[in-house]
Structures are given as structure tokens and as C-alpha cells.
Image: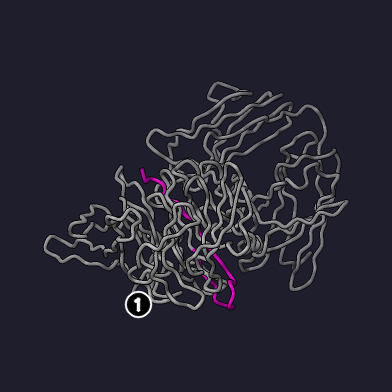
Amino acid sequence: MSGAAWTLTIGDQSELRFGNEKSWFTILITNNTSSDASLVFSLTLPLEFAANINDIEFLLAGSDDSVPTQIDTSAPQTTWKIGGGRGIAVSANSYTALKLASIQPVSAGDFQLPVKWLESGNAVSKSLPVTVQSGDDWPTIGTFAADDDVFEPQAGAKITLRWEVNNADTVLLFRGATQVLPAPGDTTAGNTGHWQDPLTDRITDFQNYQLKTFNKGNQVSDWVFVRIQNPGWNRIPRCVEGAPLVMVNDNDQRLYGVFLNNGIASLYQLNPSQGTLGAEDRFLKKVPPGLETSPGAFFNQRIWIIGGSQIDPNVCSNTVWWFDPLTKDSDTAQAPWKSRMGHAVLAFDGALWVIGGVDAAANTLADVYRSTDGKQWTQVTNQVPALCMAGAAAYDGRLWLCGGTDSAFGTPQKFLWYLSKGQDPSWKDATWTKMKFRGGLKDPSFSELAYGDPFACGLTPAKLKGDDVLCGIGTFQTQPSGIDSRKFTVKGIDYWTNTADLLTDDSIPQSKLWAITVDGSDRQQPFRLTATQFKSLIFAVSLVYGSKSTSLSYLVQDTLSQGGQK
């Protein structure tokens, strides 16, 4: 195939064996051009090739990143579209390896696997030959796993690996490309064992381990990938369940999230300590139509999704939907307040709260409602000023608002407000106060966030070196035309003078910026940020509204987490 832009071949290393439920092989994808490019291709596997066609994993070799696929099953074969809409990216004159893992071969023998792709509008077809080996003199790996799939480095902490192997005369353990077991003087690591990584050198992102087992020269291997949750911001790799839109915390017992995938929103119970966010999550229920991008909260042992969109001005609603993750019950009701979008929702002081937003007539709302049951709602007080897309949090017995705009995608507001309870237990006499920040000893206090115009701002309570603080996360327009994302902390609050310390913890690195490329355009700033604290982590989700049509054309997000909050 001289002059071809792409070449697809089977990699030299593979472990395809009848009876091995973790068989695997690789496809080398070579970009023969002088420009970086991406490839989407189809791969067909005959049904007699594997017993678990629908469960095969598609991974980029050297990581545990799942490759987007679309499956089309039609006997006697199964075809995948591999690479999703964007394709598998490969640098100029280079290659990458696609690993097909967790295969259960049906029988031994030779197989031809057809692949197809397009080059300059022309279809290219090829067959890739693979061989499934036979024989009983093979070792088997029963288990090979890490105690923690996500590891947060701390003083004295170690990554612990455990394994159980059968029918092996030699077992070797590798950390990356370095063999760490057996110890000097030993010939094998043993068919059952464990090892703690002393972490003597710096590790980032993913740490990979390989267990190689041998019997009479026959080799079977398995890999473990541990995601390193370094202190500071960590970009969460691709969420396989879709785009994360909402995250809610059940008092640090469980974390829940709503993910959008092909226009369908689904609720999941998340497990941040096991695997990539979204990869090891448990599906709970589909979110009703019309509430796909709505905000939510956890209240009274239920997950609540309330009102219209967080970001789309064309989706206003007053619908209230709840789901009980224990009983699996759910219900929907209509609230008495105006349909809206861009509002804030949170649980605070034994009630659900709905704050501000924009109605269907594009009026920015200055109202605040609370409900103790999600059915009966009471207007508390007018919001000062009217805000849309503001960050909201409950902290120190008060309700806090930060940033926001004066209309949908309007002028950013630079202020931090808090709502204080009066004598009325239903908060009807509550008052809003604008927080001021201390300057130097001889400097006057100031009330504006000093980082620029906040296009988006999220708030969450958090712990900083053991202290309870209010954490803000924002993307700011700096002068004259820059974009800066940063985390800031409010502490040392003096309610008598309405002043506090404003600490700049960090500026988010450009590689982790919540300024997102939308539809091939230049970098765009997000218009909605939400922040959720869960145990020692802070999760942030940013959303960008694509304005290429009057409807929601693109909803793009970047989920980051920050460790080291203890």
C-alpha cells in the first residue's frame, strides 16, 4: 500500500490463547504523513473468534484510557467503529498502539479481522491476521490488582499490589520497564504474593505495573494501572459514561453524578477511589427529558434535579425531580416559582434552595425560594442583585453567592455575597451582605474579586490544612484579553466588620485550564462552573454553551479534582 496515509498492522506481542479469559493483542496504527492526524476505522470480529464480543476492552496501549467505540452486532460477525467522532490521534510519521483486552477466545486457530477506513474520501480495506494458540501448559492469572486504583501520595503511603497465579514456574513483577521482583537470589515472585511500591522516584498521572508469568516457556501477562492523585489539580481522563454535568455529595458517604451521553442524561453513583471517574460507576436511573442539563443537590437521602438548564437560555423549567438511591423510587412535580435557567440549587439549613436565574422572557430573577420537602416552596427574600449562573455554597451557617452575570451571558459580577438568618425560622427576614476583603494594615478593604471579570465561578466548602474554609474556583477575563483560571480561599471572616482574608491558592496551569475549544474554534471560556467537595477532594465541572445555533449545540466540560485538601 505504497503512499498510503495510514498503515494498520498486528503488533509483535500478543497473548491469544484458548482458555485464557484475559487474552489480548495490539493493532499498530501508523500515520505515514508529515502532519498530526486522527483516524476513525471499523474493525470486524467473527463471532467464532471470541465468546465475549460485547465485553472486549479497547485501550490505548500504555494507559487505561478507553477508546470511544460504537458497536454494530449482526450475525455472524460484530463490527466496531473505533475512535468515536474525533478519531485516534497519531503524531506525524509516528504510530500508536490500540490494545484489545479481556478477550475470551472460543477456539484455537487462525483468524482474519477486516478493517476499513477512508483516505481522501476513498475506502481502504485490509484484513489483519491473528492466531489463537492452543495447549494446556499455560499459566493463569487469577487476580492481579492494586489495593487502590487511585492513589494519593502522602508521607509513608505506598501502592500495594496483590496477585494469585496458577500453574506458573516463574512469576516476574515489573514497575514500568523495571523488574522489581523476584528479589536478588530468588527465581520467582511466587504464585501468591504482594508487593509495596516504595515510591522512591517521582510518579505522575499513571503508574503501570506488569505481572509476567511463565510455564514451560509459555507466557501470560497482565497489567495494573494506578492513577496518581497528586496534590493540586488533576485532569480526570475521559469519563466513559459521558459528559459530567452535575455532582452531588451525600455528606461524604457517596458521590453522585449526572452524565450526558448522546443527548441522554443518566444518574450514576460514583466511586472516586476506584478507577477513572466514570469507569467504575454504577448506573442508577435515566434523568427525565427536559432536565438533562439542570442543576441538583442531595437532600433528605434523595438526589434532586431542579428547574431548567444550567447553561442553555432556551431551556427554562420549574420541574422538580427526585430519586432515592436506596429504594429506587422517584417522582416529579411542578414548583410554584417561575420557570428558569441559570439558577443555583443547593441544600442548606434543612431545606432545598433555588436562587435567581433567568426566566423564559430573558428577565434576570432576584428571588430566593426554599422548601423542606420539595413540594411546598416559600419565597425567602429578594436576591441582591439579580444574578444568573452564580456560584453558590452553604458555609458557616450562611448561604453564599459568588460571581454570576446580570443576564444570560451578560456582564460578569465581581462580588461575594452571604445571606444571614434573622429571627424568622423560615428565613423571611434574612438579609444579604456584600463581603469585603482586607488589604494591608494601612490599606482600605475592597469588595471586588481582584483577579479580573469572572466569566464563571464555583463555590464549595473545603478543608485547608485542617481548617474549614470557603473555596472559590473561577475563570477570569484579565486585561487586556487574557484568561486566567484560579482557586481562591476565603477565611478569617469577621462578620462584625464584614471583612475576610482572600487567599490566592493557585493559578490553574494552562494544561488544565477550563478554557475549552468548542467546535474547532479558538479557546473559549466557560460560562458555568460548579465545584463539589468530597472528602479530601474538590471536583470542578465547567460548561460552555455553543452559540452556533439557537439550541444547545455543544456542551463541553472538563472535570478536575484537587487532592491535598486535608
Classed neighbour count for the residue bearing mark 1: other residues with Cα under 10 Å, few (<14), some (14–19), many (≥20): few
Q: Give whichever of 166, 345 is nearer the camera.
A: 345
The vertical placement of 209 against 422, above or below, is above
* Residue type, label 1: Pro
Q: Give whichever of 125, 559 is nearer the camera.
A: 559
| Picture quarter with the N terminus | bottom right
The vertical placement of 217 against 540, above or below, is above
Q: Give whichever of 189, 102 is nearer the camera.
A: 102
Q: Give the left or right position of residue 26, taking residue 336 as reference.
A: right
Q: Which residues are magenta?
A: 543-566
Q: Give whichever of 481, 548 is nearer the camera.
A: 548
The vertical placement of 62 against 127, above or below, is above
**Place of residue 43 in the rendered image (x, y in percent of width and height, measured from the top left):** 77, 56
**Label 1, on which residue?**
480
Identify the residue at the far right of this view: 76
Q: Quadrant of residue 365?
A: bottom left
**Place of residue 481 in the rendered image (x, y in percent of width and height, measured from the top left):** 38, 76
Q: Give the left or right position of residue 543, taking residue 97 as reference.
A: left
In the rendered image, is residue 191 in sight? yes
Residue at position x 49%, y 78% from top?
Answer: 361
**Place of residue 315 in the rendered image (x, y in percent of width and height, measured from the top left):** 55, 70
Identify the residue at the far left of this view: 442
Residue at position x 71%, y 24% from top?
Answer: 167
Residue at position x 52%, y 65% from top?
Answer: 318
Q: Is residue 65 magenta?
A: no
In the rendered image, is residue 526 in sight? no
Residue at position x 82%, y 62% from top?
Answer: 125
**Place of residue 422 in the rendered image (x, y in percent of width and height, measured from the top left):** 27, 57
| Picture quarter with the C terminus | top left
Secondary structure under the numbered disc 1 in the rendered image: loop
Q: Is residue 563 magenta?
A: yes
